[in-house]
Amino acid sequence: MKPKRLIIMGAAGRDFHNFNVCFRDNPAYQVRAFTATQIPFTAGRTYPASLAGKLYPGGIPIFDESLLLELLKKERVDEVVFAYSDVSPESLMHKGSAVLAAGADFRLIGPDASMLQSRKPVLSVCAVRTGCGKSGLSRLVCRIIAGAGLRPVVVRHPMPYGDLEAQAVQRFETLGDLARERCTIEEREEYEPHLASGVLVFAGVDYARVLQAAEAEGDVVVWDGGNNDFPFFRPDLELTVLDPTRPEDCFCYYPGEVNLLRADVLVINKCNLVSAQTLAGLRDAVRLRNSGARIVMTDSVISLEDSGEVQGKRVLVVEDGPSVTHGGQCGGAGLACAQALGALVVDPRPFAVGSLASAYRDFPHLGAVLPALGYSEGQLADLARTVARVPCDLVLAATPIDLAPLIATGKRVLRVRYEVSAGEELGLIVVETLRRLGLPVAV
């Protein structure tokens, strides 16, 4: 039989992983192309031959998703695999319908086919939607593991925005490693807080090799998920984070609902930001969908250095980029902090330049906040130019990193920090799991 001709729809993450696990060196399939969306500057590249395997000596081209229907016809495609996250079921099925109308099959690859088995215990932290607080929960889980006398290592969902061949396996131990790897703002936001706590971070493109590297240096692997994707590794404990400030989003985004249904522990974060009635309604709703999961309540604690300087001042609010772009939020911790302290929030939209101006057109739901987008040096320069143009007294930067040195506009930047705060229950669950897996847990 002739091999099936395949296109993988992706966003420089799950798509590459599914290819590596399911299709690389598989003569039953011939992958004709990847398509790319969500993440800028991905289309136009090539998945390199060194990663694609012996069946693809020239690598595999990556095209913009807008060209999908044209590619289906040109490449005589038999099957399309959808492989990215944080999409509504409606959007997902519109894409599927277009593929089916063109005559090809439309396929989703599930956890059993795509998860790698680790030799070490794996605890996964995922979410129902981008911006729920999974990164903060991952850091808390790492602190619990370290407190039990064990060494956690973090494997982060991929963000290969540069040279794919050079980024096949990445190990981060110091801030110097971030500079050496020319990490984007998005990568720094996820890696830097772990490094500040002394936790090694691994990432890359080929996650079988990434897993081997992580296993060699840690007692417990913590999967720090991206967007609302499910893990690449088979977890021994699955934690899924929910955001009660967006309760309707907990059940209606793919593949976040998969994480909700699979979870051993459902963590309702940001409990301090909503009413008791909202929390009760969400608890009841998730119990109906996953009655076997334990439910843990946590707070998202927001803090600001020099908060006394903010009242009555004109402030520019800079938010974590992915949370307010494809995460769908009109604002985040920075906006909440500014409003609580009586600041005058300046709308940055009239002052946006270049790729930042394009972002407001691409994500019309955005409010009077500036997303900290920095997927390239050019985009970082656009961010700095936009900040410089906004007439404000202060910049409130609600990103997990110190943004000031990266944009160097001369304006005073105050960091808005937010951490997950939990009672004893989460720690007991994690330690109980480690004991069950036979690890020597310190008393």
Image: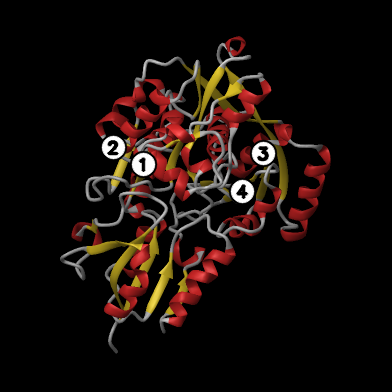
Q: Earlier in the sequence, mark 3 or mark 1?
A: 3
- What kind of element bears circle 3? loop
Do the residues bearing badges 1 and 2 touch, measured as CB atoms within 8 Å? yes
- What kind of element bears circle 4? strand
| 335 vs 116, nearest the viewer | 335
Query: How far is mark 2 from mark 4, CA to CA?
Result: 35 Å
Q: Which residue is mark 4?
A: 240
- What kind of element bears circle 2? helix
Q: Which residue is mark 3?
A: 269
Q: Nearer the viewer, mark 3 or mark 1?
A: 1
Q: In the picture provided, is 235 more to the left or to the right than 19?
A: right
**Position of 181 relative to 256 (above/below):** above
For the point 72% across and 36% down, the residue is 271
| 103 vs 220, nearest the viewer | 103
Within 10 Å of the Cα at label 4, are there few (<14), some (14-19), or many (20+) other Cα atoms?
many
Q: Nearer the viewer, mark 3 or mark 4?
A: 3
Q: Earlier in the sequence, mark 1 or mark 4?
A: 4
Within 10 Å of the Cα at label 2, are there few (<14), some (14-19), or many (20+) other Cα atoms?
few
Do the residues bearing badges 1 and 4 touch, measured as CB atoms within 8 Å? no
Q: Which residue is mark 2?
A: 378
Q: In the picture provided, is 211 more to the left or to the right than 314?
A: left
Q: Which residue is mark 1?
A: 355
For the point 37% across and 64% down, the residue is 66
- Which amino acid, by three-letter code, is at mark 2? Gly
Query: How far is mark 3 from mark 1, CA to CA?
Result: 32 Å
Whole-percent x, y for residue 423 in the image:
71, 31
User: Which quadrant is home to the C terminus?
Assistant: top right
**Position of 70 relative to 170 (above/below):** below
